[in-house]
Image (tube, coloured by chain):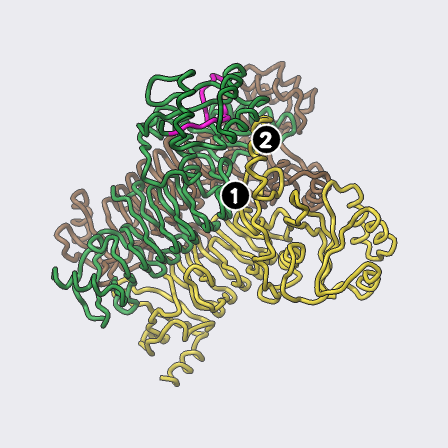
Chain colours: A brown, B yellow, C green
């Protein structure tokens, strides 16, 4: 068994799932957990078991894991529908509850970005109105808005989107998120991460921690420990003109304010404020003495360590300077001259 | 008659309108609608009719349009004041209810940006506290904040502004808005538009759809179908240093991440990541062979098709390259050499 | 006595303060105020007096300042704990109530950024879950989230942070804040300031007013009247790669969209769209005739008036042009050639 989650969710008026909250999702649950599940389930690669009162009680009777049992008992008086979702394998996503379970696995830190099969996730996630009355089917929103007004109540609509805010589902350890509207469920945030107001983290993306994030971490991008993204710093995603290459940022890097990168960075790299490196940017590579080694496309420097990227302010030339630790790289590049 | 809206709104303690919500605004209502209105109204170019119980009943008795009748009937038990607002012509805005009606026309997709007379809108819109208890007069906020605290309740103040969030008034079809705080009422969003977390759309601005918006669409700017704005991409507005020229973006353009434009773009134009084109930027125009045609100011390329703007990374020269479809443009520009 | 605040706040389940709201904080309260306080207090540089019913009544009996008396009387039926916080001197911050009092002093406009001793503020501020049920201890959030769900209620978590939104504590006069998630308590916003959706103001930072803020004002940065920050404009802070130099922006400056500065600007300076000036940027200083005066590092132009910074679009050279008012500066710089 790949994953199991006991959840509480929201359905629309046609009883279709809109979203599911899994307080304590399990990755690779212990063998005895799935064995009793066979009393209840289940063909296929993934599925859900509606936790009506009879099913919930039956599960309680055989559940041995204390925290899962406590959760099941808590659900006794739920005003909202409850469900057990299981994924036998990490296959393509076929349902809304399965999509939410995988997003929870990421944000609980149980799986890293780019390690899960997320095929089918867009189709599995309905576009939802996220409101102060909870998640709502988009088609039910206009009437709800009018009815709230008539009753003198305010209905706040915070988002119309397929993905919710991380913080309404998960409280990651040792993390600050200044504006929760900027971090989607499915983001992976390691302890010591601070996402400032201008920071953004998409699903299946994130940080190892500690990190200071004032820029945008696109889908698929992972930032290793000690690296900072300055305000409005951009990591190119695979949408909106980005290519197919999913980039990553190594340790102790700095992408300064208003800068950006379309290539992966190794460790200890810096991009100066305001400079955007795309894979096709022609870069003058300088050695430690400041002498030109060669001119190459930035993609040839993909994922290398110890690089400093600047645009020379007297010539407009984009330069890559290396530091003491980069001697090996220089030697290697000279060799290929 | 230009427009009519039946609405439900908020007044301050002095019975001045703060805002009005019009669930089903009408543009150019059918002739019989205004004719019976004459029983109730109305000199002037615009005006409001307070929908007290007697007036509401009288209107119900003569209303023939089913959806407007249904709306009127729904208002019977409203806890908040109701109003019918009419605009005989598209004149300057003279009242808060009229301003809100025009903003609704835009966001319901009934009128396009730059097609409405919005003169006087800033004066007509009071600066309001937008709170979890609904819209509130700014002067009434400090007491409300204290009283909520005393009662052990939380009062969330999401904005102090003249313009509200679009999503608290209108649910546009086929649209995603990841963070509703970034789209003002009065934005026009065509079906297939996704406004990501870093996107922004002002009032009297918007997209034809489909579009991916991760940048900022300033007041007056319209983006045609198939065009994308990367993260933090900027379209120069007429505030904060922008000029008087209202710009537009044609079809299938890409303004990449951290780029920007102060000129209009025609169709199929691209601005590379991190490059800002202002009207005064001196641009080297290259033909298909990469040969220099001439150097000109970017404003001379205003609204032309098939242009690619880059800053050469080895010389710092801002270049405009044309593609195969741009031959006609090249020929024309050579001619004017 | 340096400051006194009568407040109402939130404690966690261990009765530790999470935050305090001071509706009417006092800077340098009149002498008689502290004198009667001596009935109740108080050794040390700062401290708090729990306002239980007996203490509150006793204070009412001796309070002579009408607005403070009215506040005390209002607190009679509070559902939340009340407190009087006093700071004898402007010393290092030792407690959560003291930290909140200083943040209030800034946002009420009673003290300017960089005038208060804020040493110890990070340690004094707990990381809090800011929710639609009010501030909450982070460790209490997961259970609260589940219980709300079970009851069919929505619990919105807007932030996990040490600093709250300004607007949930203070309503500054003559100010617009389009998205309150972007302005922290402790920001100082002068009348006539508009902070647009892309604007951001940290604590101990702000504007003199009037100002249009569509960019980011980092901790410690102060912007004088008449200056505008375009969309995504950056003022380098002392975190995330910034240096130790706290910068300021003079009067009537324009930092255009997607631009930024790591040096202070004097009055009437402009940075063109998309250009980032760091202290180490080599700048060609031009006189009024456009002739090169000298090449220097931007830090040598720190805080000078009447400068226009551009990157020449045909050579890539970062230039600083001066205008008529800058003759004195030019003369001075020629002298030092």
Is residue A65 visible in the rendered image? The answer is no
Is residue B297 within the magenta segment? no
Q: Find residue B2 and report its image quarter.
A: bottom right
Q: Position of residue C160 (x, y in %)?
A: 46, 33
- In this rendering, does residue B43 appear at all? yes
User: Magenta span covers which residues?
Assistant: C3-19
Q: Is residue A181 above or below residue B191?
A: above
Spatial separation of the CA atoms under disc 2 and disc 1: 50 Å
Between C145 and A102, the one lying in front of the other is: C145
**Dots 2 and 1 on the same chain:** no
Question: Considering the numbered disc 2 on the image, is that residue within a helix, a strand or a loop?
Answer: helix
Residue at 59%, 30% (x, y): give it: B147
Tell us which disc is closer to us: 2 or 1: 2
Mark 2–mark 1 CB contact (< 8 Å): no
Q: For mark 1, give the secondary structure.
A: loop
Q: As drawn, is B76 to the left or to the right of C15? A: right
Residue sitting at 77 percent across and 45 percent down? B75
**Residue at which label 1 appears:** A119
A55 is higher (above) or lower (below) than A266: above
Q: Which residue is mark 2?
A: B147
> Which percent across, then down, holds residue A91?
52, 37
Q: Position of residue B77 (x, y in %)?
A: 79, 41
> Which residue reaches farthest right?
B61
Position of B293 with respect to C73 (left or right) is left
State the image coordinates of residue A33 (x, y, percent, origin top left).
54, 20
């Amino acid at each position: 068994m790949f994953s199991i989650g006991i959840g509480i969710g929201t359905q629309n008026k046609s009883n279709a799932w809109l979203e599911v909250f899994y307080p304590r999702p399990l990755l690779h649950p212990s063998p005895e957990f799935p064995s009793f599940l066979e009393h209840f389930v289940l063909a296929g690669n993934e599925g859900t078991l509606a936790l009506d009162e009879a099913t919930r009680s039956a599960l309680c009777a055989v559940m041995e894991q204390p925290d899962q049992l406590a959760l099941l008992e808590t659900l006794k008086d739920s005003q909202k529908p409850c469900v057990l979702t299981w994924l036998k394998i990490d296959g393509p996503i076929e349902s809304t509850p399965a999509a939410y379970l995988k997003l929870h696995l990421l944000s609980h830190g149980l799986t890293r970005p780019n390690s899960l099969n997320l095929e089918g996730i867009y189709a599995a996630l309905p576009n939802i109105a996220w409101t102060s009355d909870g998640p709502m089917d988009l088609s039910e929103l206009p009437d709800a808005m009018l009815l709230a007004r008539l009753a003198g109540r305010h209905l706040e609509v915070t988002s119309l989107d397929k993905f919710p805010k991380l913080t309404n589902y998960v409280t990651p350890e040792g993390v600050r998120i200044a504006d929760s509207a900027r971090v989607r469920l499915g983001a992976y945030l390691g302890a010591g991460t601070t996402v400032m107001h201008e920071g953004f983290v998409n699903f299946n993306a994130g940080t190892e921690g500690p990190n200071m994030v004032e820029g945008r971490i696109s889908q698929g991008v992972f930032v290793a420990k000690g690296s900072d993204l300055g305000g409005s710093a951009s990591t190119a995603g695979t949408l909106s003109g980005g290519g197919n290459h999913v980039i990553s940022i190594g340790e102790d890097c700095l992408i300064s304010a208003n800068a950006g990168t379309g290539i992966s960075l190794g460790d200890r790299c810096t991009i100066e404020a305001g400079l955007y490196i795309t894979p096709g940017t022609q870069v003058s590579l300088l050695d430690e003495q400041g002498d030109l080694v060669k001119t190459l496309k930035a993609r040839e420097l993909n994922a290398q360590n110890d690089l400093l990227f600047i645009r020379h302010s007297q010539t407009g030339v984009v330069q890559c300077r290396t530091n003491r630790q980069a001697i090996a790289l220089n030697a290697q590049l000279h060799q290929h001259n």
